């Protein structure tokens, strides 16, 4: 099902707010170089899946995801402050393999 125009807009704004908050507000040493690639908010705005790509290996990825999970309260507070929506979605963080898959595909194509 395609998200509505409003949900797409909410997703985009949340992606920007979360990305900026990760860069400027989180001081967790576990969090490495992270890019928020996309956000998928449920139609009722109760939950949001935040997809991130992380620079580094699996250890960095696991540490970063753990750091993000423990910082979700700070990020949700930031969303509540920045966005005028009735309900602040509960965030869950997921590793986005798309960039990695793209690199693997281009390597395969080069061979």
Image: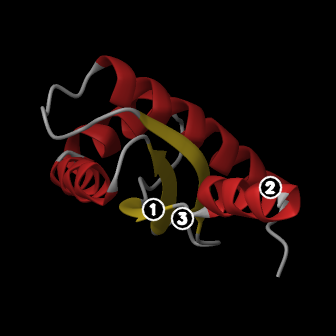
23 relative to 57, above or below: above
Q: Nearer the viewer, residue 39 or 109?
A: 109
54 relative to 94, above or below: above
What quarter of the picture does the C terminus occupy? Answer: bottom right
Q: Is 49 on the left-hand or right-hand side of 11?
A: left
Mark 1 Cα-neighbour bin, 10 Å: few <14, some 14–19, many ≥20? some
What kind of colouring is applied to the model shown? secondary structure
List x then y, in percent, for residue 96: 54, 60
Q: Where is mark 1, residue-wise?
A: 95
Q: Where is mark 2, residue-wise?
A: 106
Q: Secondary structure at mark 3?
A: loop
List x then y, in percent, for residue 51: 52, 57
Q: Secondary structure at mark 2?
A: helix
Residue at 16% over, 40% down: 30
Which mark is on residue 45? Answer: 3
Q: Is 45 on the left-hand or right-hand side of 23?
A: right
Q: Residue furthest top?
A: 24
Which mark is on residue 109? Answer: none
Q: Quadrant of residue 18?
A: top left
Mark earlier in primary sequence (3, 2):
3
In three-dimensional space, the C-alpha distance between marks 3 and 1, rounded to whole angstroms, equals 21 Å
Disc nearest the viewer among 3 and 1: 1
In three-dimensional space, the C-alpha distance between marks 3 and 2, rounded to whole angstroms, equals 37 Å
Q: Nearer the viewer, residue 35 or 41?
A: 35
What quarter of the picture does the N terminus occupy? Answer: bottom right
Q: Nearer the viewer, residue 110 or 43?
A: 110
Q: Nearer the viewer, residue 33 or 11?
A: 33
In three-dimensional space, the C-alpha distance between marks 1 and 2, rounded to whole angstroms, equals 20 Å
Mark earlier in primary sequence (1, 2):
1
Residue at 33% over, 45% down: 76
Marks 3/2 in contact by CB < 8 Å: the verdict is no
Q: Secondary structure at mark 1?
A: strand
């Amino acid at each position: 099902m395609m998200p509505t125009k409003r949900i797409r807009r909410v997703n985009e704004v949340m992606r920007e707010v979360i990305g900026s908050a990760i860069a400027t507000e989180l001081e967790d040493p576990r969090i490495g170089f992270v890019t928020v690639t996309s956000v998928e908010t449920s139609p009722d705005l109760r939950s949001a899946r935040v997809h991130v790509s992380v620079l580094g290996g699996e250890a960095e990825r696991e540490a970063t995801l753990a750091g993000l999970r423990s910082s979700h309260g700070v990020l949700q507070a930031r969303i509540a402050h920045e966005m005028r929506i009735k309900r602040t979605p509960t965030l869950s963080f997921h590793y986005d393999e798309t960039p990695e898959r793209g690199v693997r595909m281009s390597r395969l194509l080069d061979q």
